[in-house]
Image (tube, grey):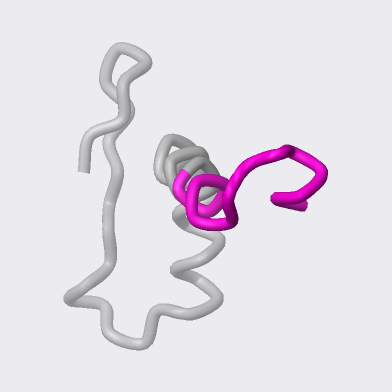
Amino acid sequence: MAISCDMPKTILAAHMIGFVLNHPDLIKFYQDQFNTDDQYRIRPINQGGKIYY
């Protein structure tokens, strides 16, 4: 996908991480799938259209 987007893989990965971290539903999805320790769970708060952790 990085080749088709004409960017380095690390830049594409950074864009993808930023996208996921700005969508609480995606954060929840990944944590539901892979989080094994609840003390590290991120609970994002949507306040005025901005996401806070």
Where residue 43 appears, as percent x and y from the top left, is: 27, 52
**Is residue 38 a member of the stretch shown in magenta?**
no
Q: How many marks?
A: 0
The answer to whether residue 26 is above or below residue 49 is below
Q: Which residues are magenta?
A: 1-14
Question: Which residue sits at x=21%, y=73%?
Answer: 40
Main secondary structure of the magenta stretch: helix
Where residue 53 appears, as percent x and y from the top left, is: 21, 44
Quadrant of the image occupied by residue 29: bottom right
Horizontally, residue 4 falls left or right of residue 15, namely: right
Please state which of residues 48 and 3 is positioned toward the viewer in this rendering: 3
Quadrant of the image occupied by residue 21: top left
Question: Which residue sits at x=58%, y=50%?
Answer: 8
Please state which of residues 5 and 40 is positioned toward the viewer in this rendering: 5
Residue occupying the far top of the picture: 48
The answer to whether residue 41 is above or below residue 33 is above
Question: Which residue sits at x=30%, y=43%?
Answer: 44
Question: Which residue sits at x=37%, y=15%?
Answer: 49
Where residue 37 appears, as percent x and y from the top left, is: 28, 85
Residue occupying the far bottom of the picture: 36
